[in-house]
Amino acid sequence: MAGGKEQIQTSAPITLTEGAVIQLQKLMQEADIPAEYGLRVGVKGGGCSGFSYVLGFDEVKDKDEVYDVSGIRVLMEKSHGLYLLGMEIDWVDGLNNRGFTFNNPNATDTCGCGESFSA
């Protein structure tokens, strides 16, 4: 937390597949991400279906909860947990599709790109 002592929680609302963990570790090393940063997972308004996923490396903010998910430090605003509870993030590396995918059991509708949803 900004200026304070953060508490890392081990029971996270999301999961990362082994492929996602490997790719995230690779990205962190290649981009020389500072050790105090974590993987920000969240939602924001917009996208084809109402909400878009947020996924990127960031510093801990005051509103964040910090989780250890398979050895990856995950940052998430507490209010986003409602939309992300039970979500699995995977890494796909196929001929037609390459990137992170979101398997969200809370989504009532998703768009064709898989990067936005409605709940």
Image (cartoon, rainbow, N blue to C red):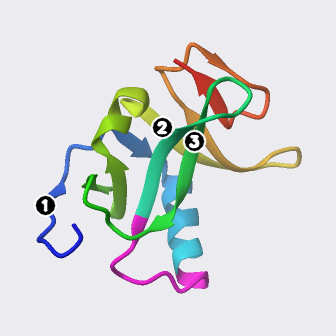
Q: Mark 1 or 2 closer to N-term?
A: 1
The single residue placed furthest to the top in the displayed view is: 108
Q: Position of residue 95 (x, y in %)?
A: 88, 49
Give SS at disc 1. loop
Q: Mark 3 or 1 closer to N-term?
A: 1
- In this rendering, is residue 88 above or below 75? above
* CA separation in Å, label 2 and label 3: 12 Å
Query: Which one is in front, 34 or 51?
Result: 51
* Residue type indicated by callout 2: Glu
Q: Is residue 32 magenta?
A: yes
- In this rendering, is residue 54 above or below 35? above
Residue at image coords 53%, 65%: 24
Residue position marked by numbered label 1 in the rendering: 7
Q: Is residue 112 left or right of residue 4?
A: right
Q: Quadrant of residue 59?
A: bottom left
Instruction: Read off the magenta span.
Output: 29-38
* Residue type indicated by callout 1: Gln
Query: Which one is in front, 8 or 48?
Result: 48
* CA separation in Å, label 1 and label 2: 23 Å
Residue position marked by numbered label 3 in the rendering: 53
Q: Position of residue 32 (x, y in %)?
A: 53, 86
Residue position marked by numbered label 2 in the rendering: 88
* CA separation in Å, label 3 and label 1: 24 Å
Residue at image coords 64%, 15%: 109
Q: Is residue 89 magenta?
A: no
Residue at image coords 88%, 44%: 96
* Residue type indicated by callout 3: Tyr
Q: Position of residue 10 (x, y in %)?
A: 19, 51
User: Quick one: quadrant of the N terminus?
Assistant: bottom left
